[in-house]
Amino acid sequence: MNKIEIACLPGDGVGIEVMASAKQVLQKAADMHGGVQFSMTDFPWGSDHYIETGAMMPEDGIERLKEFDAVFLGAVGNPAVVPDHISLWGMLIKIRRELELSLNVRPARLIKGIQSPLRSPKDFDLIVVRENSEGEYSEAGGVIHNGQNEIAVQNGIFTRKATERAMRYAFELARTRGKKVTSATKSNGIVHSMPFWDRVFQETAKDYPDIETSSAHIDALSAFFVTKPESFDVIVASNLFGDILTDIGSAVMGSIGIAPSANLNVEGTYPSMFEPVHGSAPDIAGQGKANPIGQIWTAKMMLDHLGYTDLGQAILDATEEVTESGIKTADIQGTSSTEEVTQAILSTLQKKG
Ligand code: NAI
Ligand code: MG
Protein backbone atom coordinates (compact mmCIF):
# COMPACT_ATOMS: atom_id res chain seq x y z
CA MET A 1 0.00 0.00 0.00
CA ASN A 2 1.36 3.38 -1.03
CA LYS A 3 1.13 5.96 1.73
CA ILE A 4 0.94 9.63 0.73
CA GLU A 5 1.52 12.22 3.44
CA ILE A 6 -0.57 15.36 2.93
CA ALA A 7 -0.29 18.50 5.09
CA CYS A 8 -3.75 20.09 5.30
CA LEU A 9 -3.93 23.82 6.05
CA PRO A 10 -7.63 24.80 6.11
CA GLY A 11 -6.75 28.40 7.05
CA ASP A 12 -9.64 30.81 7.61
CA GLY A 13 -13.31 31.34 6.79
CA VAL A 14 -14.73 29.11 4.07
CA GLY A 15 -11.29 27.52 3.74
CA ILE A 16 -12.19 25.44 6.80
CA GLU A 17 -15.54 24.39 5.31
CA VAL A 18 -14.34 23.45 1.83
CA MET A 19 -11.28 21.67 3.23
CA ALA A 20 -13.57 19.37 5.25
CA SER A 21 -15.46 18.52 2.02
CA ALA A 22 -12.35 17.87 -0.06
CA LYS A 23 -10.80 15.64 2.63
CA GLN A 24 -13.87 13.40 2.56
CA VAL A 25 -13.67 13.19 -1.22
CA LEU A 26 -9.96 12.32 -1.06
CA GLN A 27 -10.67 9.65 1.53
CA LYS A 28 -13.43 8.15 -0.61
CA ALA A 29 -11.18 8.14 -3.68
CA ALA A 30 -8.46 6.30 -1.73
CA ASP A 31 -10.97 3.73 -0.42
CA MET A 32 -12.10 3.03 -3.98
CA HIS A 33 -8.56 2.72 -5.31
CA GLY A 34 -7.47 0.30 -2.63
CA GLY A 35 -3.76 0.68 -3.34
CA VAL A 36 -3.17 4.09 -1.81
CA GLN A 37 -3.62 5.65 1.59
CA PHE A 38 -3.77 9.39 2.17
CA SER A 39 -2.47 10.31 5.58
CA MET A 40 -3.83 13.82 6.15
CA THR A 41 -2.35 15.91 8.95
CA ASP A 42 -4.19 19.12 9.92
CA PHE A 43 -2.35 22.29 10.83
CA PRO A 44 -4.72 24.90 12.32
CA TRP A 45 -2.63 27.88 11.15
CA GLY A 46 -4.08 31.18 10.03
CA SER A 47 -5.69 34.27 11.52
CA ASP A 48 -6.82 32.63 14.78
CA HIS A 49 -3.29 31.37 15.28
CA TYR A 50 -2.11 34.94 14.70
CA ILE A 51 -4.50 36.32 17.32
CA GLU A 52 -3.29 33.73 19.84
CA THR A 53 0.43 33.82 19.13
CA GLY A 54 1.25 36.87 17.01
CA ALA A 55 2.23 34.73 14.00
CA MET A 56 0.17 33.10 11.23
CA MET A 57 2.19 29.92 11.54
CA PRO A 58 4.87 28.67 13.96
CA GLU A 59 8.49 29.54 13.34
CA ASP A 60 9.36 25.99 12.28
CA GLY A 61 6.19 25.76 10.13
CA ILE A 62 7.96 25.69 6.77
CA GLU A 63 10.41 23.05 7.99
CA ARG A 64 7.51 20.87 9.09
CA LEU A 65 5.77 21.22 5.73
CA LYS A 66 8.92 20.06 3.95
CA GLU A 67 8.39 16.58 5.43
CA PHE A 68 5.19 16.05 3.43
CA ASP A 69 4.48 14.81 -0.10
CA ALA A 70 2.11 17.72 -0.76
CA VAL A 71 0.58 20.74 0.94
CA PHE A 72 -3.18 21.20 0.60
CA LEU A 73 -4.41 24.67 1.54
CA GLY A 74 -7.89 26.18 1.93
CA ALA A 75 -7.80 29.97 2.10
CA VAL A 76 -6.20 32.57 4.29
CA GLY A 77 -7.54 35.91 5.50
CA ASN A 78 -9.81 37.43 8.13
CA PRO A 79 -9.61 41.13 7.27
CA ALA A 80 -11.93 42.18 10.10
CA VAL A 81 -9.30 41.21 12.67
CA VAL A 82 -5.97 40.73 10.86
CA PRO A 83 -4.79 43.08 8.08
CA ASP A 84 -4.52 41.26 4.74
CA HIS A 85 -0.84 42.05 4.22
CA ILE A 86 -0.05 40.24 7.49
CA SER A 87 -2.20 37.20 6.77
CA LEU A 88 -1.11 36.73 3.17
CA TRP A 89 2.60 37.46 3.60
CA GLY A 90 2.74 35.58 6.92
CA MET A 91 1.50 32.34 5.45
CA LEU A 92 0.51 32.07 1.79
CA ILE A 93 3.31 34.04 0.21
CA LYS A 94 5.79 32.71 2.75
CA ILE A 95 4.93 29.14 1.70
CA ARG A 96 5.10 29.99 -2.02
CA ARG A 97 8.54 31.60 -1.64
CA GLU A 98 10.18 29.25 0.84
CA LEU A 99 9.02 26.05 -0.81
CA GLU A 100 10.24 27.53 -4.14
CA LEU A 101 6.92 27.11 -5.89
CA SER A 102 8.08 28.53 -9.19
CA LEU A 103 5.05 27.70 -11.33
CA ASN A 104 1.40 28.46 -10.87
CA VAL A 105 -0.89 26.26 -12.92
CA ARG A 106 -4.58 27.02 -13.38
CA PRO A 107 -7.03 25.21 -15.63
CA ALA A 108 -10.27 26.65 -16.93
CA ARG A 109 -12.94 24.59 -18.62
CA LEU A 110 -16.62 24.55 -19.22
CA ILE A 111 -18.30 22.42 -16.54
CA LYS A 112 -21.66 20.83 -17.30
CA GLY A 113 -24.48 22.47 -15.37
CA ILE A 114 -22.49 25.65 -14.62
CA GLN A 115 -23.53 28.76 -16.50
CA SER A 116 -20.61 30.64 -18.06
CA PRO A 117 -21.12 34.41 -18.44
CA LEU A 118 -20.33 33.89 -22.14
CA ARG A 119 -23.52 33.89 -24.20
CA SER A 120 -22.87 30.72 -26.19
CA PRO A 121 -19.65 29.16 -24.91
CA LYS A 122 -18.13 26.30 -26.86
CA ASP A 123 -16.61 23.42 -24.93
CA PHE A 124 -13.34 25.03 -23.79
CA ASP A 125 -10.65 23.25 -21.76
CA LEU A 126 -7.46 25.21 -21.30
CA ILE A 127 -4.67 25.46 -18.76
CA VAL A 128 -2.41 28.40 -17.99
CA VAL A 129 1.18 27.79 -16.87
CA ARG A 130 2.34 30.95 -15.15
CA GLU A 131 5.96 31.64 -14.23
CA ASN A 132 5.64 32.39 -10.52
CA SER A 133 9.06 33.42 -9.23
CA GLU A 134 10.31 36.42 -11.22
CA GLY A 135 9.35 38.44 -14.30
CA GLU A 136 7.45 41.67 -13.82
CA TYR A 137 6.93 40.92 -10.09
CA SER A 138 10.45 41.70 -9.00
CA GLU A 139 11.84 43.84 -6.25
CA ALA A 140 14.53 45.32 -8.51
CA GLY A 141 14.11 49.06 -8.89
CA GLY A 142 13.35 52.02 -6.72
CA VAL A 143 12.05 55.54 -6.42
CA ILE A 144 14.35 58.57 -6.29
CA HIS A 145 13.96 62.37 -6.04
CA ASN A 146 10.81 64.23 -5.06
CA GLY A 147 8.00 66.28 -6.52
CA GLN A 148 8.17 66.97 -10.25
CA ASN A 149 11.59 65.27 -10.36
CA GLU A 150 10.39 62.03 -8.85
CA ILE A 151 11.43 58.91 -10.79
CA ALA A 152 10.14 55.35 -10.33
CA VAL A 153 12.04 52.48 -11.89
CA GLN A 154 10.67 48.95 -11.92
CA ASN A 155 12.84 46.28 -13.51
CA GLY A 156 11.55 42.98 -14.80
CA ILE A 157 13.81 40.00 -14.21
CA PHE A 158 13.74 37.22 -16.80
CA THR A 159 16.29 34.46 -16.35
CA ARG A 160 16.83 31.78 -18.96
CA LYS A 161 16.53 29.15 -16.23
CA ALA A 162 13.08 30.16 -15.00
CA THR A 163 11.76 31.04 -18.45
CA GLU A 164 12.80 27.72 -19.92
CA ARG A 165 11.51 25.84 -16.86
CA ALA A 166 8.03 27.27 -17.35
CA MET A 167 8.08 26.56 -21.07
CA ARG A 168 9.32 22.99 -20.73
CA TYR A 169 6.61 22.31 -18.18
CA ALA A 170 4.02 23.70 -20.63
CA PHE A 171 5.30 21.51 -23.48
CA GLU A 172 5.37 18.38 -21.33
CA LEU A 173 1.83 19.14 -20.15
CA ALA A 174 0.63 19.67 -23.72
CA ARG A 175 1.92 16.20 -24.59
CA THR A 176 -0.62 14.75 -22.16
CA ARG A 177 -3.45 16.92 -23.52
CA GLY A 178 -4.27 18.70 -26.78
CA LYS A 179 -0.65 19.02 -28.05
CA LYS A 180 -0.77 22.79 -28.46
CA VAL A 181 1.16 25.52 -26.62
CA THR A 182 0.46 29.24 -26.95
CA SER A 183 3.03 31.70 -25.64
CA ALA A 184 1.82 34.99 -24.17
CA THR A 185 4.13 37.73 -25.35
CA LYS A 186 4.28 41.48 -25.87
CA SER A 187 7.46 41.82 -27.90
CA ASN A 188 6.00 44.70 -29.89
CA GLY A 189 5.96 46.90 -26.80
CA ILE A 190 8.37 45.42 -24.25
CA VAL A 191 11.52 45.37 -26.32
CA HIS A 192 14.10 43.50 -24.19
CA SER A 193 12.49 40.83 -22.02
CA MET A 194 9.73 39.81 -24.42
CA PRO A 195 11.91 39.25 -27.53
CA PHE A 196 14.09 37.18 -25.15
CA TRP A 197 10.95 35.30 -24.02
CA ASP A 198 10.04 34.64 -27.69
CA ARG A 199 13.55 33.41 -28.47
CA VAL A 200 13.59 30.97 -25.54
CA PHE A 201 10.12 29.78 -26.61
CA GLN A 202 11.29 29.06 -30.17
CA GLU A 203 14.43 27.30 -28.95
CA THR A 204 12.55 25.18 -26.43
CA ALA A 205 9.90 24.28 -29.02
CA LYS A 206 12.59 22.57 -31.12
CA ASP A 207 12.70 19.79 -28.51
CA TYR A 208 8.95 19.24 -28.94
CA PRO A 209 8.32 18.83 -32.68
CA ASP A 210 5.08 16.97 -31.90
CA ILE A 211 3.56 20.06 -30.29
CA GLU A 212 1.87 22.81 -32.28
CA THR A 213 3.03 26.26 -31.18
CA SER A 214 1.82 29.82 -31.50
CA SER A 215 2.54 33.19 -29.93
CA ALA A 216 0.04 35.93 -29.23
CA HIS A 217 0.39 39.39 -27.75
CA ILE A 218 -1.18 39.54 -24.31
CA ASP A 219 -3.76 42.15 -25.26
CA ALA A 220 -5.14 40.13 -28.18
CA LEU A 221 -4.80 36.91 -26.17
CA SER A 222 -6.93 38.36 -23.34
CA ALA A 223 -9.64 39.17 -25.87
CA PHE A 224 -9.42 35.64 -27.37
CA PHE A 225 -9.92 34.14 -23.89
CA VAL A 226 -13.37 35.74 -24.03
CA THR A 227 -14.22 35.34 -27.72
CA LYS A 228 -12.79 31.87 -28.44
CA PRO A 229 -11.48 30.10 -25.31
CA GLU A 230 -12.09 26.76 -27.07
CA SER A 231 -9.14 27.47 -29.40
CA PHE A 232 -6.56 27.06 -26.58
CA ASP A 233 -4.88 24.08 -24.95
CA VAL A 234 -1.83 25.05 -22.85
CA ILE A 235 -0.80 28.70 -22.49
CA VAL A 236 2.58 29.67 -21.05
CA ALA A 237 2.91 33.15 -19.59
CA SER A 238 5.11 35.38 -17.49
CA ASN A 239 4.12 36.27 -13.93
CA LEU A 240 2.05 39.38 -14.71
CA PHE A 241 0.50 38.11 -17.93
CA GLY A 242 -0.35 34.78 -16.30
CA ASP A 243 -1.92 36.55 -13.34
CA ILE A 244 -4.27 38.47 -15.62
CA LEU A 245 -5.07 35.55 -17.93
CA THR A 246 -5.96 33.19 -15.08
CA ASP A 247 -8.45 35.68 -13.65
CA ILE A 248 -10.14 35.86 -17.05
CA GLY A 249 -10.06 32.06 -17.15
CA SER A 250 -11.91 31.70 -13.84
CA ALA A 251 -14.35 34.43 -14.83
CA VAL A 252 -15.43 32.65 -18.03
CA MET A 253 -16.00 29.42 -16.09
CA GLY A 254 -18.78 31.03 -14.09
CA SER A 255 -17.65 31.36 -10.45
CA ILE A 256 -14.50 31.91 -8.46
CA GLY A 257 -15.84 29.20 -6.13
CA ILE A 258 -14.97 26.45 -8.62
CA ALA A 259 -11.49 27.52 -9.80
CA PRO A 260 -8.50 25.37 -8.73
CA SER A 261 -4.75 26.00 -8.75
CA ALA A 262 -1.43 24.27 -8.22
CA ASN A 263 1.77 25.96 -7.04
CA LEU A 264 4.53 23.68 -8.20
CA ASN A 265 8.08 23.03 -7.12
CA VAL A 266 9.12 21.61 -10.48
CA GLU A 267 12.47 20.24 -9.31
CA GLY A 268 10.80 18.28 -6.52
CA THR A 269 13.14 19.69 -3.88
CA TYR A 270 10.18 20.59 -1.66
CA PRO A 271 6.50 19.63 -1.74
CA SER A 272 4.15 21.48 -4.07
CA MET A 273 1.16 23.36 -2.72
CA PHE A 274 -2.43 23.10 -3.94
CA GLU A 275 -5.13 25.70 -3.21
CA PRO A 276 -8.35 26.96 -4.75
CA VAL A 277 -8.25 30.38 -6.39
CA HIS A 278 -10.81 31.92 -4.05
CA GLY A 279 -10.14 33.51 -0.68
CA SER A 280 -11.74 33.00 2.73
CA ALA A 281 -15.06 34.65 1.65
CA PRO A 282 -15.88 36.26 5.03
CA ASP A 283 -19.24 37.40 3.62
CA ILE A 284 -20.54 33.81 3.49
CA ALA A 285 -18.26 32.01 5.99
CA GLY A 286 -19.99 29.85 8.60
CA GLN A 287 -23.28 29.73 6.69
CA GLY A 288 -22.82 26.39 4.93
CA LYS A 289 -23.07 28.11 1.55
CA ALA A 290 -19.49 27.82 0.27
CA ASN A 291 -18.98 26.03 -3.01
CA PRO A 292 -16.63 23.10 -2.30
CA ILE A 293 -15.84 22.47 -5.99
CA GLY A 294 -12.78 24.77 -6.15
CA GLN A 295 -11.17 22.83 -3.29
CA ILE A 296 -12.29 19.45 -4.68
CA TRP A 297 -10.97 20.22 -8.17
CA THR A 298 -7.75 21.36 -6.48
CA ALA A 299 -7.57 17.91 -4.85
CA LYS A 300 -7.79 16.45 -8.35
CA MET A 301 -4.79 18.57 -9.42
CA MET A 302 -2.88 17.31 -6.38
CA LEU A 303 -3.69 13.71 -7.32
CA ASP A 304 -2.54 14.35 -10.91
CA HIS A 305 0.73 15.71 -9.56
CA LEU A 306 1.20 12.71 -7.26
CA GLY A 307 0.64 10.34 -10.20
CA TYR A 308 -2.95 9.27 -9.45
CA THR A 309 -4.52 10.77 -12.56
CA ASP A 310 -7.22 8.07 -12.72
CA LEU A 311 -8.44 9.03 -9.25
CA GLY A 312 -8.28 12.72 -10.13
CA GLN A 313 -10.38 12.16 -13.23
CA ALA A 314 -12.92 10.11 -11.26
CA ILE A 315 -13.32 13.01 -8.83
CA LEU A 316 -13.83 15.58 -11.58
CA ASP A 317 -16.26 13.31 -13.47
CA ALA A 318 -18.33 12.77 -10.31
CA THR A 319 -18.33 16.52 -9.61
CA GLU A 320 -19.53 17.30 -13.11
CA GLU A 321 -22.27 14.70 -12.87
CA VAL A 322 -23.49 16.41 -9.70
CA THR A 323 -23.48 19.95 -11.16
CA GLU A 324 -25.24 18.64 -14.27
CA SER A 325 -27.96 17.11 -12.06
CA GLY A 326 -28.58 20.57 -10.57
CA ILE A 327 -27.16 20.00 -7.07
CA LYS A 328 -25.26 23.30 -6.79
CA THR A 329 -24.46 26.07 -4.32
CA ALA A 330 -25.89 29.58 -4.64
CA ASP A 331 -22.86 31.12 -6.42
CA ILE A 332 -23.64 28.90 -9.42
CA GLN A 333 -27.39 29.44 -9.36
CA GLY A 334 -28.23 26.49 -7.10
CA THR A 335 -29.97 26.13 -3.75
CA SER A 336 -27.89 23.36 -2.16
CA SER A 337 -25.55 23.64 0.82
CA THR A 338 -21.84 22.81 0.95
CA GLU A 339 -22.75 19.59 2.74
CA GLU A 340 -25.41 18.57 0.20
CA VAL A 341 -23.04 19.07 -2.73
CA THR A 342 -20.30 17.16 -0.90
CA GLN A 343 -22.59 14.24 -0.08
CA ALA A 344 -23.83 14.11 -3.68
CA ILE A 345 -20.24 13.96 -4.98
CA LEU A 346 -19.36 11.24 -2.45
CA SER A 347 -22.32 9.07 -3.42
CA THR A 348 -21.67 9.57 -7.15
CA LEU A 349 -18.05 8.47 -6.59
CA GLN A 350 -19.29 5.45 -4.65
CA LYS A 351 -21.71 4.52 -7.45
CA LYS A 352 -19.01 4.80 -10.12
CA GLY A 353 -16.41 2.93 -8.07
P1 NAI B 1 -12.85 35.93 -1.89
O1 NAI B 1 -12.39 35.03 -2.98
O2 NAI B 1 -12.74 35.41 -0.51
O3 NAI B 1 -14.37 36.32 -2.17
C1 NAI B 1 -14.80 37.01 -3.35
C2 NAI B 1 -16.29 36.71 -3.61
O4 NAI B 1 -16.43 35.35 -4.05
C3 NAI B 1 -17.17 36.83 -2.37
O5 NAI B 1 -18.43 37.35 -2.74
C4 NAI B 1 -17.31 35.41 -1.87
O6 NAI B 1 -18.51 35.15 -1.17
C5 NAI B 1 -17.25 34.61 -3.18
N1 NAI B 1 -16.66 33.29 -2.96
C6 NAI B 1 -15.34 33.01 -2.73
N2 NAI B 1 -15.17 31.70 -2.55
C7 NAI B 1 -16.38 31.13 -2.66
C8 NAI B 1 -16.85 29.79 -2.58
N3 NAI B 1 -16.03 28.75 -2.33
N4 NAI B 1 -18.17 29.57 -2.76
C9 NAI B 1 -19.02 30.57 -3.02
N5 NAI B 1 -18.63 31.85 -3.12
C10 NAI B 1 -17.33 32.14 -2.95
O7 NAI B 1 -12.05 37.30 -2.05
P2 NAI B 1 -12.05 38.60 -1.10
O8 NAI B 1 -13.41 38.83 -0.55
O9 NAI B 1 -11.40 39.64 -1.90
O10 NAI B 1 -11.06 38.25 0.08
C11 NAI B 1 -11.48 37.74 1.36
C12 NAI B 1 -10.24 37.36 2.15
O11 NAI B 1 -9.56 36.28 1.49
C13 NAI B 1 -9.22 38.47 2.28
O12 NAI B 1 -8.64 38.38 3.54
C14 NAI B 1 -8.20 38.15 1.19
O13 NAI B 1 -6.93 38.66 1.46
C15 NAI B 1 -8.20 36.64 1.24
N6 NAI B 1 -7.76 35.98 0.01
C16 NAI B 1 -7.03 34.85 0.16
C17 NAI B 1 -6.66 34.13 -0.93
C18 NAI B 1 -5.94 32.85 -0.69
O14 NAI B 1 -5.87 32.34 0.41
N7 NAI B 1 -5.39 32.25 -1.73
C19 NAI B 1 -7.00 34.54 -2.30
C20 NAI B 1 -7.84 35.70 -2.35
C21 NAI B 1 -8.19 36.42 -1.22
MG1 MG C 1 -4.60 37.64 -9.43
Image (cartoon, helix red, strand yellow):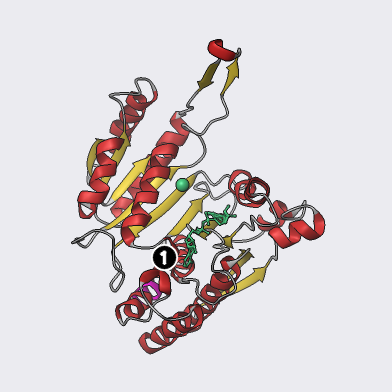
Taking the spot 57% from the left edge, 73% from the top edge, the residue there is 17
Q: In which quarter of the image is residue 189?
A: top left
Picture coordinates of residue 141, whole percent (x, y):
56, 22
Residue at (60% x, 69% y) in the render: 16
Q: Residue furthest right?
A: 53
Asked if 189 appears above or below 214 in the picture, the reply is: above
* Rendered-image quadrant of the C terminus: bottom left
* Residue range corresponding to the magenta coloring: 313-317
Spot occupied by residue 90 in the image (x, y as percentages of width and height): 68, 48
Tag 1 secondary structure: helix
Quadrant occupied by the N terminus: bottom right
- 316 in the magenta segment: yes
Residue that mark 1 sits on: 258
Specify whether 271 is left or right of 124: right
On screen, residue 301 above or below 334: above
Measuring 50% from the left and 52% from the top, which residue is drawn there?
263
Q: Is residue 148 above or below residue 252?
A: above
Q: Main secondary structure of the magenta part?
A: helix
Looking at the image, residue 347 lies above or below residue 233: below
Q: Is mark 1 within 8 Å of ligand 1?
A: yes
Quarter of the view holding residue 70: bottom right
Q: Is residue 156 left or right of residue 320?
A: right
Q: At which x and y percent is residue 88?
A: 62, 49
Residue 207 shows up from this direction: no
